Image: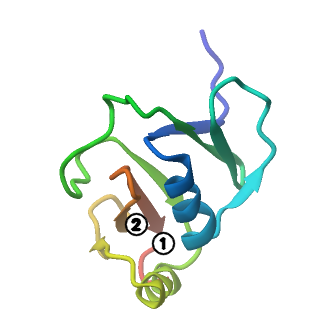
Amino acid sequence: MIELERIHHVTIATKSLEKAKEFYSEILKFKEIERPPFKSRGVWYDLGQQQLHVVENPKSETLRLGGLNSLEGHLSIWVKSYTKTLQWLEEIGLEYEIEPNSVAGFSQIYILDKDKNIIEFAAPYHS
């Protein structure tokens, strides 16, 4: 039997590493961490106990063409405050969809990155 501990990282594809870095590094302010010298281009981010790996694949067939749909695969990041996260998204002018009283048992905020990867910010109710 496999003894699971936690998610180590999530990898998402981008067609343009520069656009992805602009979004994750400049807009969301995620902290970049050292990435091994793979032959591929990419960037890694520290998400606390986990990591986000963004890899450039200009010919990717996994990237979405449509809008935001939380029923599709997505990255979920737990945040401390629902209210502060919403305020910050408003300040930077990023579009989002919300489920403040989700039946999931916590509040949910959804955004899209520049490649239309779905990112969920999950937080305690009314925090």
Q: Residue at 43%, 34% (x, y): give it.
A: 58
Where's residue 111, x and y in %?
Answer: 36, 65
Q: Residue at 18%, 50% (x, y): give it.
A: 66
Q: Disc 2 and disc 1: Cα gap in Å?
A: 5 Å
Q: Residue at 56%, 37% (x, y): give it.
A: 55
* Amino acid residing under circle 1: Pro
User: In the image, which disc is placed on residue 111?
Assistant: none
Between residue 48 and residue 102, name the one nearer to us: 48
Between residue 86 and residue 34, name the one nearer to us: 34
Residue 32's image quarter? Answer: bottom right
Q: Which secondary structure, mark 1?
A: loop
According to the picture, the residue beneath numbered tag 1 turns out to be 124
2 in relation to 63, above or below = above
The answer to whether any part of residue 112 appears in the image is: yes
Q: Which secondary structure, mark 2?
A: loop
Q: In this view, does 112 lie to the left or right of 103?
A: right
